[in-house]
Amino acid sequence: NGDPYGGSLFHTRSLQDAAGLRERQQEWLSNKFNADAICSSTKAAMAKVWASLDNGSIQQWPTEAVRTAMYDIVMRTYLGDLDEASEEVGALMRAIATYGPYAAKRVPEKKHAPIIRQLVDDVLAKTECDDIDLVRPMLANAAIGGAELLP
């Protein structure tokens, strides 16, 4: 069906199926993306940014630390504690850096989608994700630049 991540709302052809999928995704997101989860994720991810800024000298803006923190916030909000998946998250972040944000819109999907899907699956397998098939396409879209496709 041309859906590289399986279950993507964007690739669901039937309006009835899309409506059901959208409701399931929206319910899952509503349960995960609350103020406490976002604050906790932000606090954990930003600790590295604050550490890079707090060296007592004039320095360049820590672009890489900020970029990584933004993805980390999303990943932590989706998946909670990432300590067990740090290797897998690192591999996914390196792939995102290689393909760049919005890679799905610039690079033909056939080249990178299988790699991103495998990396997302590796991350999901190491976390306590409660619905991998539902979360995979949302996390993949959020990681590569397609979060506007979320319900």
Image: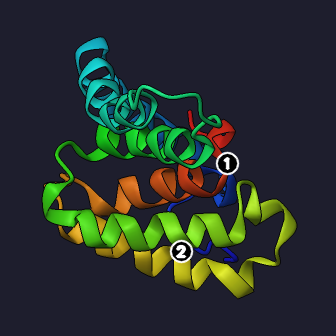
Q: Residue 146 has which mark?
A: 1
Q: Are marks 2 and 1 in contact (CB under 8 Å)?
A: no
What's under tag 2, amino acid-wise?
A: Ile
Nearer to the camera, 101 or 5: 101
CA distance separating discs 2 and 1: 13 Å
Left or right of 16 on screen, residue 39: left
Which image quadrant: the C terminus?
top right
Indicate the position of residue 133 as horizontal and vertical percent values.
35, 63
Indicate the position of residue 61 as horizontal and vertical percent values.
63, 34
Q: Residue 116 has which mark?
A: 2
Indicate the position of residue 37 as horizontal and vertical percent values.
25, 24
In what element is the residue under mark 2?
Answer: helix
- Which residue appears at 57% of the width and 44% of the height? 67
Q: Which residue lies most toward the top here?
A: 35
Label 2 neighbourhood size at 10 Å, few (<14), some (14-19), many (20+)?
many
Which image quadrant: the N terminus?
bottom right
- Which residue appears at 40% of the width and 44% of the height? 72
Left or right of 103 on screen, residue 46: left
Left or right of 64 on screen, residue 104: right
- Which residue appears at 56% of the width and 84% of the height? 114
